Image (spheres, rainbow, N blue to C red):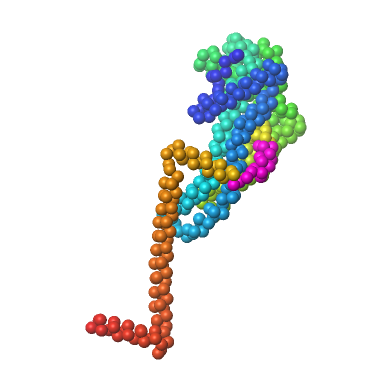
Amino acid sequence: MTEIILTQYTGMFIGPVAKLIGYIMNAIYFVMDSVFHFQNISLCIIIFTIIIYMCLLPLTIKQQKFSKLSQKMQPEINEIQKKYKGKKDQETQMAIAQETQEIYQKYGISPAGSCIQLIIQMPILFAMWRVIDNIPAYVGRVKEQFMPVVDGIMNTSGYQDTLTKFVENINLVRPALNFEGNAQQTANSIVDVLYKISGGAWDTLRESFSGLTDSINTLESSLEHMNNFLGINIAYTPWSLIRTGWDAADYLLVIGAVLIPLVSLGTQLLNIKLMPTSGASSNGNETANTMANSMKTMNIIMPLFSFVMVFSVPVGMGLYWIAGSVIRSIQQVLINRHVEKIDLDALIKKNQEKAKKKRAKKGIPENQIAMAARMNTRKLSEKATVEESSEDKEEKLRRAAEYSKNAKPGSLAAKANLVKEYNERNNKQ
């Protein structure tokens, strides 16, 4: 198998994830080619997407259970906010956090339970982009298709200057050619360049290396077949396909290129509509509100982000978004039916037992947690009572003074005022 390491993305965080995805994509393509004699990158992307979301299914179910339990416990969280309404001091906020945490413990769930899947999906998304952007660097049998042309170019006298002029003529900005490394690095950079060319650039390449016409024709045909999805080359961006189709009066290609971002947006909106909400509201605790607001924001941003980005990334990335949204929607319908049948009381009890075992492993006794919670709550309640009594006392004194000032002549209050004035004069003397 051809070595495919040097042209892979080497970022510190996304690089390893992209490498892992590349191994999976390479294995899928190898099986499809060896067993079914079918060479198609778009099908690899769809199969990979199915595998990923099947692996994430347990987390998806857990997230939906969290949403269901959140709806059930939300009234209790709202009651805490009403209890301390109007108080902004630090101790009150600590009491709110403490009592809210007790409710989460009561139901056996974590406030961060709805964010785990999103945290996992984001690096996969960006790593997948890197893989799709340069498939030959990760899929060995795709790279093998380039080698006859690459070897022919490198055996052509003065190929460095010829290839540099070719890149300038087609206005290819990225990726850059590398003639300063070893032969393998140079070959890899040529593969990177050839994978990015499209349309009339193939004619320019044939003119630049006229002795390689047959090899170039074979490579172009192979790539069109491997990257084909319903007549669209997934290695190109929708913008480039729109321009190519418009210049060639191929309006079916233009429509197909426009449909990719539109379908991506539509499928994601459908998926969001099927997802249940966690039930958090503005009356809930600060942590729950933050989580809920973050999810609402992401539900708005992600579809719009994908709609805009799909125009400027390879069609294969749009295909990944679409396949992911369709799979999630199918999963969501089935999960919704499953969650509706769940006995919440039994689920709560099960979650409580799990939480108790985790605390036991950390060496935290249950009675210690309960005692600390009761002490914190009692202290705050006592303080609130004292503050309330002081405020009531001041209000009563103010009202009494107002009443005495406006007392009717001859009334008991008026006589009391006379005695008060007499005492004040004597004290002054």
Asked if one can make out residue 107 in the rendered structure from this viewpoint, the answer is yes
Q: In what quadrant of the picture does the N terminus appear?
A: top right
Q: Position of residue 83 (x, y in %)?
A: 49, 59
Q: Main secondary structure of the magenta part?
A: helix
Which residue is depicted at the point 62% across and 27% down?
132
Which residue is depicted at the point 39% across and 63% down?
386
Q: Position of residue 233 (x, y in %)?
A: 69, 26
Residue situated in front as seen by the camera: 390 or 142: 390
Which range is magenta? 328-345
Q: Position of residue 229 (x, y in %)?
A: 71, 27
Residue situated in front as seen by the camera: 337 or 367: 367
Which residue is depicted at the point 61% across and 18% down?
140
How many numbered tags mark residues here?
A: 0
Which residue is depicted at the point 44% across and 50% down?
373
For residue 159, above or below residue 350: above
Q: In what quadrant of the picture does the C terminus appear?
A: bottom left
Residue situated in front as seen by the camera: 194 or 18: 18
Magenta highlight on residue 337? yes
Magenta highlight on residue 104? no
Name the residue furthest left: 429
Question: Which quadrant would residue 329 be assigned to in this image?
Answer: top right
Asked if one can make out residue 269 in the rendered structure from this viewpoint, the answer is no
Q: Position of residue 113 (x, y in %)?
A: 54, 41
Name the residue furthest bottom: 410
